[in-house]
Image (cartoon, coloured by chain):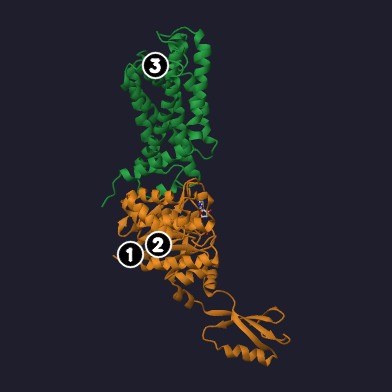
Chain colours: A green, B orange
Amino acid sequence: MKAPIWIPLYTIVNKEMIRIFRIWTQTLLPSVITTSLYFLIFGSFVGSQIQDIQGVSYMQFIVPGLVMMAIITNAFMNVVGSFFGAKLSKGIEDTLVSPTPNWVIVWGYVIGGVVRGLVVGVLVLIISLLFTKLTIVNLWAVILFSVLTAVVFSLGGLMNAVFAKKFDHTAIVPTFVLTPLTYLGGVFYSVNALPEFWQNISKFNPILYMVNGFRYGFFGISDVNIGISVTILIMLVLVLSITDLMLLRRGVGLRS
Amino acid sequence: MVDIALDIKGLYKTYSDGKVKALNGVDLTIYKGEIFGLLGPNGAGKSTLINVLTTLANKTSGEIIINGLDFAKFPSEAKTYLGVVPQEFNFHWFEKVEDIVVQQAGYYGMPAGEAKERAEILLKRLGLWDKKDTVSMKLSGGMKRRLMIVRALIHKPEILILDEPSAGVDVDLRREMWEFVRELNQEGVTIILTTHYLEEAENLCDRVGIINKGNILEIGTVKALLSELKKDTLVLDTVGEIKGLPKRYRVIEEGRLETDLLQGEDLYTITNELHSKGLQVTGIRNKTNRLEEVFINKVKD
Ligand SMILES: Nc1ncnc2c1ncn2[C@@H]1O[C@H](COP(=O)(O)OP(=O)(O)OP(=O)(O)O)[C@@H](O)[C@H]1O
Ligand SMILES: [Mg+2]
């Protein structure tokens, strides 16, 4: 008799949930605090002196971007931290010796990352309501862009964890790739306001499409085409999930 | 055919980083219901063999058949037959004892209710039930070892593999563990264990295999291996002045000699000879564990 596949999947997801909520001061709290500070400083103090962008106040404009930033960071950090920790403690071996298929391992950890990303995203969104009012023009866009983005960065975190040999290696991508791309991805400004050269450069930044797609869901405004944004996200999900699966299948960084 | 639990044919393993051939053409057959001991010095390739079996290491070449199933073709099914207790602790540091065991059951597709019941039975049986809410990091070495055994058994494997189960375990616990392994074996579980302790192999195993430098040098029952030994080294306590003894006697210290008793030789020839040289023999015993001698001889050449 073949055992139902949802049991191992649920087991990994449940393990991740226990971890996230056990160390919530490390997993949930930091982003909530930093984003609150952003709201306070950029939104309230500085933002009041900045003009409206495409009909929305500066404070409103940055909310979707900052929520997205929290989702990206938390999805990525959750998977890279948890999976690398499992590698370091060798705890991952209990999954590797079991019949749990590789795709279940990938998606178990990815779902963990998505949940943490979205939980923190919702918390940040709730806090933003203390500072400003929000509308939602297209709920589906809000859900689609937040979930797909969380999936992309969870898959990315997994890939980082597979290659990481030391704990330091888990910080390289967040510091040198994620943070710069997020700050330059139109969280704090509309790329339309940039000189043409920088506008063109920005088009190569995938985070621009995520932030704008998400912001479109709230205010119906976007610097980029929404169809292109969705396509890019889906392509990223496909490429990253296939790559992760291949890495696990070959046992890179896991089986000697 | 039906009675073969595990069949390994021409297994080679070279780690990607080095020139060490950790496994150099291993052929090994394990029968259902036996306790098999793999004996070898540090670096012999014991853990490598076990890691290849449990897929923690990728083989370079060779074939592994478990319960008649080709591992390479049916990895998921083959894995369900195996339970493994690795040499090094491998727990998620911050997870609790019971969670670790129940999770493991989940990876094998066992529903949570059943997993909890079984976890309770096994944790109680290995004396860990009162630690069920303790974080794995806070267990003693012996407790961790037992937790690894519970975890390996949770999905009812037909073959239990133990890599150095006695490492870091005190004498009492070791005896209890042997008892437990025997009980499991009687319940029908095939056991494969590696060990440094020849005493363990002698006490527990139906058959042993001696491995060195990635090669299996000898496989046989403990009795057959011992009968290969053509001599026994004896230590003799003597009273009297030691002088003018024949070459076969080696003086260790004042009042203590060593000599080899050949197979079939009468002990009387020795005591008689010493007596004639003015020595009283007040004590006599085996120098070492005899299996150890077979082992050392095999590994030496
Ligand atoms: N991950 C690895 N990468 C490279 N070489 C390895 C690795 N693991 C083991 N080896 C090498 O393979 C050989 C066999 O090691 P193995 O761990 O299988 O020995 P062992 O018989 O289990 O020894 P011990 O009794 O000390 O546990 C050794 O030369 C060892 O250095
Ligand atoms: Mg070993």
**Discs 3/1, front:** 3
Q: Which residue: 52% across, 64% down? A: B196
Q: Which residue is mark 1?
A: B4
Amino acid, disc 1? Ile
- What is the secondary structure assignment of the residue under circle 1? strand
The image position of residue B158, as x and y in percent, is 35, 60
Amino acid, disc 3? Leu
Pick whichever, B161 or A123, lies toward us. Answer: A123
Q: In the rendering, which numbered label is found on residue A119?
A: none
| Chain name for mark 2 | B
Mark 2 vs mark 1, CA separation in Å:
14 Å
Q: Which residue is mark 2?
A: B27
Residue A200 visible in the snapshot: no
For residue B224, what is the image quadrant?
bottom left
Q: Which residue: 50% across, 52% down? A: B89
Q: Count residues near mark 3 (Cα–Cα under 10 Å), then give few for <14, some for 14-19, many for 20+.
A: some
Tell me: is circle 3 under 8 Å from ligand 1: no
Circles 3, 1 touching at the beta carbon (< 8 Å): no
Pick whichever, A131 or B155, lies toward us. Answer: A131
Residue B264 falls left or right of residue A203: right
Amino acid, disc 2? Asp
Q: In the rendering, which numbered label is found on residue A134?
A: 3
The image position of residue A90, as x and y in percent, is 48, 47
For residue B29, what is the image quadrant?
bottom left
Residue B85 falls left or right of residue B112: right
Asked if both marks, 3 and 1, belong to the same chain, the answer given is: no
Q: Which badge, 2 or 1, comes first in the chain's sequence?
A: 1
The image position of residue A36, as x and y in percent, is 50, 22
Circles 2, 3 touching at the beta carbon (< 8 Å): no
- What is the secondary structure assignment of the residue under circle 2? strand
Q: Which residue: 43% across, 66% down? A: B180
Residue A26 falls left or right of residue B278: left
